Structures are given as C-alpha cells and as structure tokens.
Image (cartoon, rainbow, N blue to C red):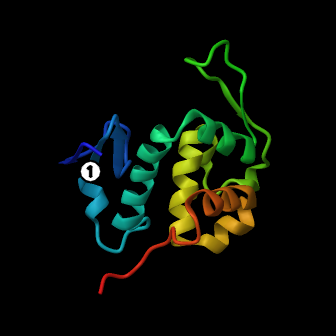
Amino acid sequence: MKEFYRSHKSKFGENPASSYNGTIVLYDNAFNSGQDPSLGQILAHELAHEKYKNLSEKDQDSYQMATNWFDFGPDKSHPSWSNRRKDDEFVRPDSKLGPEEDFAVNVQTYLYDSEKLKKRVPHAYTWIKNHFSDNFKLGRSK
C-alpha cells in the first residue's frame, strides 16, 4: 500500500472509494454515519483489490478456477471474462464484472458476513479460508 487520499466525489457516481496501483481514495460519502456498507467494509473491499493485484499468477488462477472465471480474450493482457455461475451465486451484481471485483466483494463479505458468503459462493468461501487461514477475520483491539 502506497497512499490513502480523501476526495469529494468519484467520477463514477456514488462509489465511496476506489483503488489503483497501491493508492486508495476515499470519497466524502464513505464517511456517512450509519451507511451500508460501513467505512470498515469499504476499506476491506479496497484493500482486497490491492491484495488481488499482488497475488501470484498461480494464486489468481487458482481463485479464478475455484470461482468459475474464464478468460476468453485474445491474449492475457486484454482479458475478456466470463463466468458460469448463476445470478444468485454472486454476493452483489458488481461481482460479475470480473474476478478482481468478485474477489474484493467476496473478501469483504467473508470478513463481515461469512455465513452469507458460505451460502451464496461456497467455493469462494473455501478458497479464502484455505488461502488465508482460519485466522483471517476481524478482531478487536484490546
């Protein structure tokens, strides 16, 4: 992780945050009290994007296989993603955008509502649990 910034508003509508190349930008609406998702969930999601980008190619491939993502693009530098899961096997509609967004949504859900992930996307739940261990969970500071 390189930097965190705060900005007024995303150029992509109501998006509360974005990340790119090690930089996370939180927009004003990420700080609305009582919102869903919470600021913690937003940060978990954006940090998961960064984690996915830093996974080895082998681990990315393993996640993609476990969650039924297939690249039908002409070359590896321009993927054209497809997924064979049913609509109700995604936690949120934006999970269908590609394996990185799916990963970020699934990690966020694993941390904040693991039973929902286990029910909706059991292969993602198992992959995350096996890859990061049982210790990958939210804790309380003492």
Residue positioned most to the top = 74
Quadrant into which the C terminus falls: bottom left
Residue receiving disc 1: 27
Tell me if I can see residue 94 in this picture.
no
Task: Residue at 35% x, 36% y: name it.
Answer: 20
Mark 1, other Cα within 10 Å: few <14 / some 14–19 / many ≥20: some
From the viewer's perspective, tell me whether residue 32 is left or right of residue 51: left
Q: Residue at x 61, y 22 (%)?
A: 79
Q: Position of residue 8 (x, y in %)?
A: 20, 47
> Can residue 72 be seen by looking at this rendering?
yes
Image coordinates of residue 23 in percent, x first then y, are 28, 41
69 left or right, relative to 35: right
When the figure is inspected, residue 18 is found, relative to residue 82, above or below; the finding is below
Q: Is residue 116 left or right of residue 16?
A: right
At label 1, the amino acid type is Tyr
Q: Residue at x 60, y 39 (%)?
A: 60
Which x, y percent locates residue 89?
74, 55
* Up/down of 65 relative to 75, above or below: below
Q: Residue at x 55, y 17 (%)?
A: 77
Asked where in the image residue 130 lies, by quadrant, the reply is bottom right
Residue 65 occupies quadrant: top right
Q: Position of residue 121 (x, y in %)?
A: 71, 58
Total number of numbered discs in the rendering: 1
Local SS, label 1: strand
